[in-house]
Image: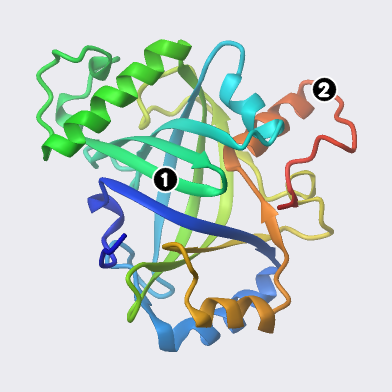
Amino acid sequence: MQAKPQKSGSVVELERQEAKYVIHPSRVAAVRDFIRPFVMPDPNAEGYPPEYTVTTLQLDSSAMTLYRAKEEESLNRFKLRIRTYDSVVGSPIFLEIKRKLNGVVSKSRATIDTAKWGPMPFLDPNSPITLKSDREHWNYLEFIRLVKEIGARPIVKVRYHRESYLGTNDNYARVTFDRKMCYQPSRSWNVFEDDGRWWNMDVDEVFHLPYSGVILELKAFNEAPLWMLDLAHRFDLVRVGFCKYFSAVRLESLFSGTMYSDTSETCVVA
């Protein structure tokens, strides 16, 4: 696949490799210095370090089918989510399907104009929603199909700050740092609606470490560029499987008194 780095809001379909790591906050500056010659700030981000806010409404079936697929580490699984990159009403909303097939991650999305957003307008394929392209239209129909097929409904909203960089000399390379993670249970389809208190996810129960970590993620097509491999070697990075949706549901169930065995962990070696 050949492509140039694109803004977060412009990607319609993407297939890539992803590697996630949990690092101590004190190491972020050193990693940032290491990648500086190879990257540029994400055009969607503001300030320095370049950041934006991500709010994601995660959907699942009443039986928590998508959550269970992650817990069981199914080789082929997917997530359904409604996402915005700004918490201000009026920002574009993205309907996203994120699939993981034999270790390869693919993401497809359709962009919805917030001004036309209603309680559940996208569930009707004949609703008067204008999409940017034929490809987005098919992504939109596929999202509807999966929502109806599994009976998906809102489960939880996750919000975090993302520091984001794009590779300057690669077909596609991206480095992100996610921090200040929080969540709230939600039954509303409105990603902007505040359903109450936001609960902190930067806690030991999430990372299983004696500190609150930062999620470092490296993303690339097929083979990672050499500087990413050097980065992982230089900082002795240990790859983990980390899912914010899984972590939020697990935390909520812990608050409700659920007990987990040592074999059911949020953050495990990939």
Residue corresponding to mark 2: 258
Name the residue tied to disc 1. 106
Indicate the amino acid at tag 2.
Thr
Q: Quadrant of residue 123?
A: top left
In the image shown, does 208 or 91 lie closer to the viewer? 208
Left or right of residue 112: residue 258: right
Taking the spot 83% from the left edge, 21% from the top edge, the residue there is: 257
Q: Residue placed at 49% from the left, 71% from the top?
A: 224
Disc 1 element: strand
**Residue 192, image x, y percentages:** 35, 32
Extreme residue in the right direction: 262
Q: Cα distance, mark 2 to mark 1?
A: 33 Å
Q: Is residue 100 above or below residue 120?
A: below
Q: Earlier in the sequence, mark 2 or mark 1?
A: 1
Would you identify the image quadrant in which residue 110 lies?
top left
Tag 2's secondary structure?
Answer: loop
Residue 26, position as x, y percentages in the image: 68, 75
Q: Is residue 173 above or below residue 53?
A: below
Above or below, comparing residue 183 to residue 31 in the picture: above
Classed neighbour count for the residue bearing mark 1: other residues with Cα under 10 Å, few (<14), some (14–19), many (≥20): some
Q: Is residue 70 visible?
A: yes
Pick the residue in front: 4 or 36.
4
Tell me the mark number nearer the camera, choosing from 2 and 1: 1
Q: Is residue 212 left or right of residue 91?
A: right
Horizontal side of 218 relative to 86 (left or right) equals right
> Can residue 198 be seen by looking at this rendering?
no
For the point 70% across and 71% down, the residue is: 237
Residue 115: x and y in percent read 15, 29
In the displayed structure, 191 sits above or below 257; it is below
